[in-house]
Image: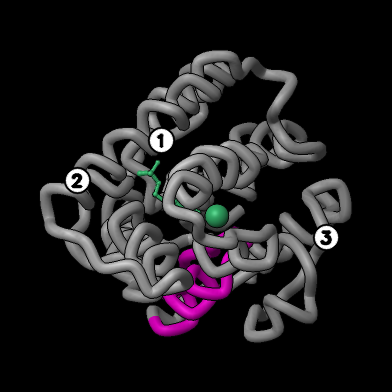
Amino acid sequence: MKTKAFIFDLDGVIVDTAKYHYLAWKKIADTLNIDFTHEHNELLKGVSRVRSLEIILGLGNVEATEEQKNEWLNQKNEDYLAYIDKMDDSEILPGVMRVLNFLKDHNQPIILGSASKNARPILEKVQILNYFDDIVDGNDVSNAKPDPEVFIVGARKANQTNENSIVFEDSVAGIEAANTAKMTSIGIGEASILNEAKFNFNNFEEISEDFLAELINQ
Ligand code: BG6
Ligand code: MG
């Protein structure tokens, strides 16, 4: 068997933390009288924390000082971490463990490529930190998705070329990042939204072991 780099996004791919991001942002938006819906929340997927706040303030045409923005960023993260604290391995999305185990059994490098600065504590909470050969997260890169930096650093850590790297992503920005780097992009979620992805699946339960073996040997 050949070796590839398998790079996983975290939020919305391994765990459904988008709902906790939403609740924590919604609290800030409510105090500012900004209408923030689940549809608006789609705009925040894959996007950094700072950029997320800018998008929300933009929805309400709210202007603020850097000091105020920092207060809201801290508040949001505190509330988010309170949700994370209650997580356990039951929140790993269906099919993820089967895919991770298949890749481990076939000696494939498994890398995390996430915009989140909370990636490590989340992987610890759901008890899969030890599956990852390397973690590249929001603390390690200066350019957020759709810039491909996070995935390119991940591929290097696995000693693989971009062309030999496969990215699992649930966000439009992340698919764009993988495509820009000439990696194989796999959209997890609605194909109509992730229509730039090379392959699309609704979830990991739809991904067969034959398909994974083909990715490894292509
Ligand atoms: C991404 C999420 O994975 O991480 C975004 O899709 C989030 O919604 C971003 O804003 C940053 O996360 P954190 O945990 O550093 O605030
Ligand atoms: Mg995501």
Residue at mark 1: C-beta within 8 A of ligand 1: yes
Circle count: 3
Q: Is residue 170 magenta?
A: yes
Q: Which mark is residue 40?
A: none
**What's the distance in space between the residues labelled 3 and 1, CA to CA?**
23 Å
> Which element type, helix, strand or loop, lies under badge 3?
loop
Give, as a three-letter code, the residue at label 3.
Asn
| Residue under the point 27% across and 36% down | 74
- Which region of the structure is painted magenta? 162-180
User: Mark 2 against mark 1, which lies toward the viewer?
Assistant: 2
Percent coordinates x, y for residue 84 in the rendering: 52, 23
| Residue under the point 63% across and 49% down | 12
> Which element type, helix, strand or loop, lies under badge 1?
helix
In this rendering, position of residue 156 left or right of residue 210: left
Q: Which mark is residue 70?
A: 2
* Chief secondary structure of the magenta portion: helix
**What's the distance in space between the residues labelled 2 and 1, CA to CA?**
20 Å
Residue, disc 3? 202
Q: Is residue 109 magenta?
A: no
